Amino acid sequence: MSGVSRRAAGWGGGLAWVVLVLGAVGTLTSCAGYQYAQLYPEGYATVAVPVFENQTFERGVAYDLTEALVKEIEQRTPYKVADADRADTLLRGTVTRVQRRQLSRTPIGGLPQEVEVEIAIDFEWEDLRRGGTLVSRRGFTSVGRYVPAQPLGEDFSQGRQAAADRAARDVVEAMRSPW
């Protein structure tokens, strides 16, 4: 190996070491101002989630939403779902509207190709120990979609479930601590 190529190889190895050290120092100093903040209010361990009321003519939507909420709370929050007599907090609400909107039609025959399902809810998250409301929303809407046209041939219940799942994710997001 010539002297020039040995120097280049030695410089490249040293340069890699310098880049590695500077990267580590940069990472450590960039984290110095970062503080971990609790995503959800502290001091609570459990949430009661009774079946939401349903003011619409769509049967089953309140059950779908409540089931989706229980799953989201258990998966994405530090809280456990419990009965109301043992819970620290209570999440209750009402389904106020379920609306379908046709987004597109098939070119031949004009049949619905894609349909949107919108669910509107009112909900409150209450502190059962100290009293008071932690979060309250009115007219909170979420949307799901389904494709009734062939070859998929999905039905309304799939769109309704997609909207309920989206609503559950949105409600759990609303339960997060304000920044």
Image (tube, rainbow, N blue to C red):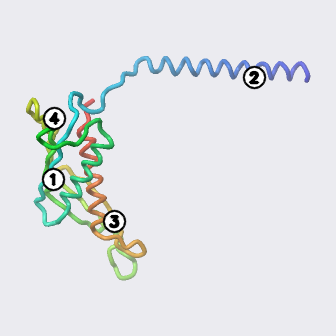
Seen at 21% across and 37% down, the residue is 46
User: Residue at label 4?
Assistant: 88
Question: Is 30 or 108 nearer to us in this picture?
Answer: 30
Q: Are marks 4 and 2 in contact (CB under 8 Å)?
A: no
Question: In whole angstroms, how far apart are the C-alphas of marks 4 and 3?
Answer: 37 Å
Mark 3, Cα crowd under 10 Å, few <14 / some 14-19 / many 20+, is: many
Question: In whole angstroms, how far apart are the C-alphas of marks 3 and 2?
Answer: 56 Å
Question: In whole angstroms, how far apart are the C-alphas of marks 3 and 1?
Answer: 25 Å
Q: Is residue 13 left or right of residue 75?
A: right
User: Residue at label 2?
Assistant: 12
* Residue 13 screen position, x and y as percent: 74, 21
| Mark 2: secondary structure | helix
In the image, is residue 40 above or below residue 141? above
Indicate the quadrant containing the N terminus: top left, top right, bottom left or bottom right: top right
The image's mark for residue 146 is 3
Disc 3 vs disc 1: which is toward the camera?
1
**Image quadrant where residue 99 sits:** bottom left
Question: In whole angstroms, how far apart are the C-alphas of marks 1 and 4?
Answer: 17 Å
Disc 4 vs disc 2: which is toward the camera?
4
Question: Is 99 or 166 nearer to us in this picture?
Answer: 166
Q: Are marks 3 and 2 in contact (CB under 8 Å)?
A: no
- Could you tell me the amino acid type at mark 2? Gly
